[in-house]
Each structure stands twice: as C-alpha cells, then as structure tokens.
Amino acid sequence: MKVLILSFSNNIVNEDSYIPNKKGLTLSCVEECEKNLKEIGCETEYICMNKKNVNKCFACGARGWGKCLNEHKCIQKDDFNTIYEYMNNFDAYIFATPVYFKEMSESAKVFFDRLKRCDAFNDNSKIKGKNIICIACAGGSGAGTDETLNSFDTLNYFLKTNMVGRIPITKLNFNEQKEVIKVSVNKLVN
C-alpha cells in the first residue's frame, strides 16, 4: 500500500526562534506516522507543502467556477495541478497541519480550497473513497484543534473520503497521542 503524507508546516524550527525545539510538532507527527507505516510494510512519500508554490483560488470563470468544475483542473500555472494529479498514485493520505489562530495553516487552507473545487464534483475522482487521517497540531495553548478538525470534516464530506483518524495534537498530549496515531495508521491500511 502506498500512503502520501502532506504536511503544511515549515517543519524545521528557525534557529533564531524562541522555541527550544529544533523540530516542530507537525514534523514530529509526520515522523511518527512514517515510522508506523514502515513498521507495517507500507510505502510512504512525504511532501512538505510549504515548499511548494500553491496560490489561492481565484474563483475565476462564470459564477466563480473555471476549469475546476468540469475539467477538474485549475487554470493557474503553479504546483497545484501536479500535486493533485500525483495524489492519484496513492492508496491513502495523511494530512497534517499546524494550528494558527485557531485554524489550519494558511498553506493548508489554500491547498484544500482548490482541492475541493477540483475534486468535489469529479465523478471520476481517484481520491473519492480513499482513507485519510487528519492531524491538527497546536503547539501553543492547544486551542484551535477542534476548529481545524471541523475544517477537515468539511474537506472529508466534499471529497467523499473515509476519515479513519481525526487527531488533535498539542505539545502537552503528543506522547499520549502516539498511540492514537498508531491505531489510526492501522485503520488507514486495513
């Protein structure tokens, strides 16, 4: 089984940051997922979406729908279409985002807005019916994981995927949530 992990964080903490970690919470979750997937023999690929060029949706065309509604691709010449098409090569997905201002990261919102537009009404979707895990990583107070996971619920509804893991992570509960990640990864592939 092939699993694609998309992360929406810069992952490595800036040396000048006041945060004492060299590695952020989102990347720690990605590594935990990778470890569990490899233990059960899955092939994984990880893409750090913050290193990709994905612009906001233009809501172009008649009534805000461009090629995305009927052709299921975007008119923009950035990395979105390549990643969207590349997703077809995988059997399941893990989405991990930090929580900023009680919401998923800006890069996650932009990508998922465009993904919904291109795939929600695609009768030939290769994403529909696949298992997903969604992880919301709140490093500060922990606030906002519920709101972020609610946004993932909306994504799951429109993509018609099967969410097998809906995981709130905070810097205080990460060690306990490793077991939830492990259980969710097992559900992802079974």
Image: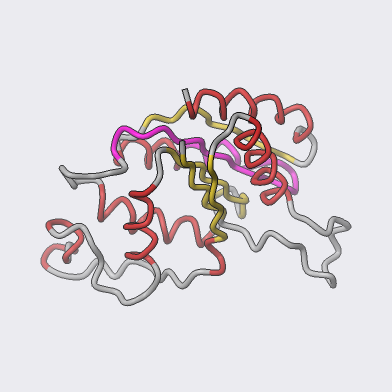
Please tell me which residue lies in front, 42 or 12: 42
Q: Is residue 187 above or below residue 45?
A: above
Tell me which residue sits at (56%, 65%) in the image: 50
Please tell me which residue lies in front, 156 or 18: 156
Q: Residue furthest bottom?
A: 77
Scheme by which the image is coloured: secondary structure
| Residue 167 percent location from the top left of the image | 59, 32
Q: Is residue 170 left or right of residue 118?
A: right
| Residue 11 percent location from the top left of the image | 68, 59
| Residue 181 percent location from the top left of the image | 63, 30
Q: Residue furthest right?
A: 20
Q: Is residue 124 magenta?
A: no
Q: Is residue 148 magenta?
A: yes
| Residue 78 percent location from the top left of the image | 37, 74
State the image quarter where residue 160 is shown. Answer: top left
Tell me which residue sits at (42%, 59%) in the image: 111
Please tell me which residue lies in front, 38 or 158: 38
Please tell me which residue lies in front, 2 or 24: 2
Q: Is residue 22 left or right of residue 63?
A: right
Tell me which residue sits at (69%, 45%) in the image: 31
State the image quarter where residue 145 is shown. Answer: top right
Stretch of the chain drawn in magenta: 128-151
Q: Is residue 156 left or right of residue 27?
A: left
Q: Residue furthest front?
A: 41
Q: Is residue 53 left or right of residue 82?
A: right
Please tell me how many numbered marks the rendered image carries.
Answer: 0
